[in-house]
Image (tube, grey):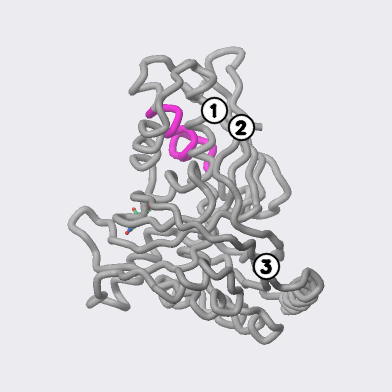
């Protein structure tokens, strides 16, 4: 399975709910940074139970942050499906990771979505898509979007999805941090900084920019209510955002709960050479800054979890 990362084009966060979550208006945009997840029948029952997890990929220090026990969201996806269908058998789940780990790009959610679809096939469950989406939502707020991909607005805690069609392709640069941030901690910091958060509202300017495939307007409309909380926990991100903006990015924001920073470098009807130049300038400035562990480029949107 091939499954994409996401960046949030708008992340509006309301007040804390009684269940510990927050109501969101969360505009997800799937980008061409993919994890590959392979699920195979285990030759013998793994010591760890239903699933044995392995991880690879060229993400350096990020890989050591991937838990390889039952707490990994892929193991929980397999366990949930086995419990609901009674058809589970032991599997090995290999994650070839290219999406930053604990980076605000929903890499763990993406892997879980891939594991859910792969186990559904391998075990011959063939559940309807609606059921898979419901199980995905039980696993985490961002998991349904990884199944759907493209560009979509998520409401509720982010799991109630509505597609947002736009004709354009957009190009991005991502600055990966040497650090990870816990989503729960960033939301807690948000509550501390914004005890009086208003109800979240969709941004009409963002929808118009997407409909017109206008990269300049999209760059201006990017917004993330969690950015202040992420900067409060990792103040050096402010300099990362400034570096990309000064180098010519059309827009810059922390992706989701961070700490990955996202820079829009063009798209829509712009000439490829204009986009390439802007992208090269932003990449060079970020690499020279010494602020990030690595810098990667990607475009969006792209489809959700796909069987290879
Ligand atoms: O849904 P998920 O497991 O990805 O959420 C991780 C944590 O992020 C939650 O435990 C909660 O603290 C926080 N969260 C939230 N409101 C949301 C989504 C996540 O407070 N809408």
Q: Is residue 265 visible?
A: yes
How far across and how far down the image is residue 186, in percent? Answer: 40, 66
How far across and how far down the image is residue 205, in percent? Answer: 44, 76
Which residue position holds label 1?
118
Q: Residue at x 53, y 58 (%)?
A: 29
Q: How many marks?
A: 3
Q: Is residue 287 visible?
A: no
Q: Earlier in the sequence, mark 2 or mark 3?
A: 3
Q: Spatial distance from mark 2 to mark 1, Cα to Cα?
A: 8 Å
How far across and how far down the image is residue 180, in percent? Answer: 54, 60
Query: Could you tell whether 281 is left or right of 91 in the image?
Result: right
Confirm if mark 2 falls within 8 A of ligand 1: no
Which residue position holds label 2?
307
Closer-to-camera residue (239/155)? 155
User: Crowding at label 2, few (<14), some or many (≥20) Cα neighbours within 10 Å?
Assistant: some
Q: Is residue 138 above or below residue 21?
A: above
Tell me which segment is drawn in magenta. Answer: 67-80
Q: Which quarter of the rendered image does ligand 1 occupy?
A: bottom left
Q: Earlier in the sequence, mark 3 or mark 1?
A: 1
Quadrant holding the C terminus? top right
Quadrant holding the N terminus? top right
Q: Residue at x 36, y 31 (%)?
A: 131
Q: Which mark is residue 173?
A: 3
How far across and how far down the image is residue 203, in percent? Answer: 39, 73
């Amino acid at each position: 399975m091939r499954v994409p990362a996401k960046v949030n084009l708008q992340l509006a966060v309301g007040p804390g709910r009684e269940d510990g979550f927050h109501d969101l208006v969360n505009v997800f945009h799937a980008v061409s940074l993919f994890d590959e997840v392979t699920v195979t029948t285990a030759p013998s029952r793994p010591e760890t139970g239903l699933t044995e997890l392995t991880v690879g990929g060229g993400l350096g220090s990020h890989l050591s942050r991937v838990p390889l026990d039952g707490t990994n969201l892929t193991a929980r996806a397999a366990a949930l499906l086995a419990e609901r269908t009674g058809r589970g058998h032991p599997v090995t789940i290999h994650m070839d990771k290219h999406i930053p780990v604990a980076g605000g790009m929903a890499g763990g959610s993406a892997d879980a979505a891939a594991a859910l679809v792969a186990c559904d096939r391998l075990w011959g469950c063939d559940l309807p898509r609606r059921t898979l989406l419901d199980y995905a939502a039980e696993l985490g707020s961002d998991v349904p979007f990884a199944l759907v991909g493209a560009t979509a607005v998520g409401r509720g805690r982010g799991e109630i999805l509505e597609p947002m069609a736009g004709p354009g392709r957009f190009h991005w640069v991502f600055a990966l941090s040497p650090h990870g941030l816990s989503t729960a901690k960033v939301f807690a910091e948000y509550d501390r900084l914004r005890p009086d958060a208003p109800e979240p509202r969709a941004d009409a300017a963002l929808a118009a920019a997407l409909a017109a495939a206008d990269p300049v307007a999209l760059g201006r409309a990017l917004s993330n209510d969690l950015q202040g909380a992420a900067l409060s926990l990792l103040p050096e991100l402010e300099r990362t955002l400034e570096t990309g903006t000064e180098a010519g990015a059309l827009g810059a924001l922390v992706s989701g709960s961070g700490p990955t920073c996202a820079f829009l470098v063009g798209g829509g009807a712009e000439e490829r050479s204009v986009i390439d130049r802007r992208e090269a300038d932003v990449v060079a400035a970020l690499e020279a800054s010494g602020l990030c562990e690595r810098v990667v480029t990607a475009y969006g949107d792209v489809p959700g979890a796909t069987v290879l």
